Structures are given as C-alpha cells and as structure tokens.
Image (tube, grey):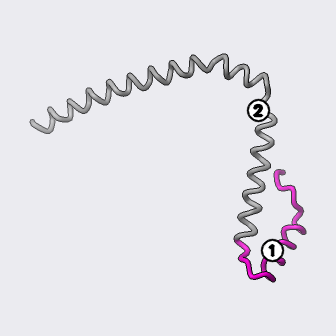
Amino acid sequence: MYNKKSPAQIKTELDTAKESGEKNIKVLFNNFIEIHQNLLDTLKTKLLTEENKAKFYAKKDDFISLALDFKSNSEKIFEEYKNLGKDYSTE
C-alpha cells in the first residue's frame, strides 16, 4: 500500500545495482526507508489536522501537570526505597 514502486521497478533497481557492483541489501534498505517515509507522510496528513492540533493544545497543560505530578511522586518513592534499602543493607 505504501510502496509506490512496482515489482518491475524494484527488479530493475536490483539488476542495476548488481551491474554497478552495489549490494542488493542497499537497494532493499532504500526501498524499506521509502515505504516508511510514505507511511509517515500519510499519517501526518491524516492525523495532524488543524482539529487534532487544537485538541492537543487544549489538553497540553493537563498533560504537563500530569507528567510533573508523576515525576514528583516517582522521586518521592525513589527516595523512600533508597533509604529503605540502606536500612536493609545494615541489618
């Protein structure tokens, strides 16, 4: 679906690479990258709409506050268990 080349075009690229001394893996890898770039371009056009961007920016502050809460809670838990680990090691 995201490969814009026909099998004949890929075979021609492989034959050209073989004649020039390049390895087939390089041609296949380039096609692999191209397919994924096409996929990303499609996702960008479908997902990065103005409506979705507006929804994201509306919720952005909520996400940031959740992340900060998570960070502070995880730091407290880390300190608590760090001290508990010292107690257990002395015992």
Label 1 neighbourhood size at 10 Å, few (<14), some (14-19), many (20+)? some
Q: Is 59 placed left or right of 49 in the picture?
A: left
Q: Is 7 colored magenta in this rendering?
A: yes
Against 58, residue 21 (above or below) is below
Quarter occupied by residue 45: top right
Task: Quote the CA–CA distance across marks 2 and 1.
Answer: 34 Å
Q: Is residue 12 located in the magenta-colored stretch of the structure?
A: yes
**Residue 48, position in %: x, y?**
76, 31
Q: Main secondary structure of the magenta part?
A: helix
Q: Earlier in the sequence, mark 2 or mark 1?
A: 1
Label 1: state its secondary structure: helix
Q: Give the secondary structure at mark 2.
A: helix
Q: Residue at x 87, y 66 (%)?
A: 7
Q: Are marks 2 and 1 in contact (CB under 8 Å)?
A: no
* Residue positioned 35% across, 27% down in the render: 75
The disc placed on residue 56 is: none
Report the magenta residues as a range: 1-25
In the picture, residue 41 is in which quadrant?
top right
In the rendered structure, which amino acid carries the disc numbered 1? Leu
Look at label 2 and name its amino acid: Leu
Image coordinates of residue 18 in percent, x first then y, are 78, 80
**In this view, 25 is above or below 77:** below
The residue where tag 2 is placed is 47
Instruction: Assess disc 2: are there few (<14), some (14-19) or many (≥20) residues with their C-alpha within 10 Å of its C-alpha.
Output: few
Locate residue 11 relative to residue 86 in the image: left or right: right
Q: Can you give x and y, in whole percent of width and height, for residue 69 in the image?
A: 44, 20
Q: Which residue is mark 1?
A: 14
Q: Residue at x 74, y 67 (%)?
A: 28
Q: Quadrant of the C terminus?
A: top left
Residue depicted at 51% across the width and 18% down the height: 65
**Depicted 72 relative to depicted 45: above or below:** above
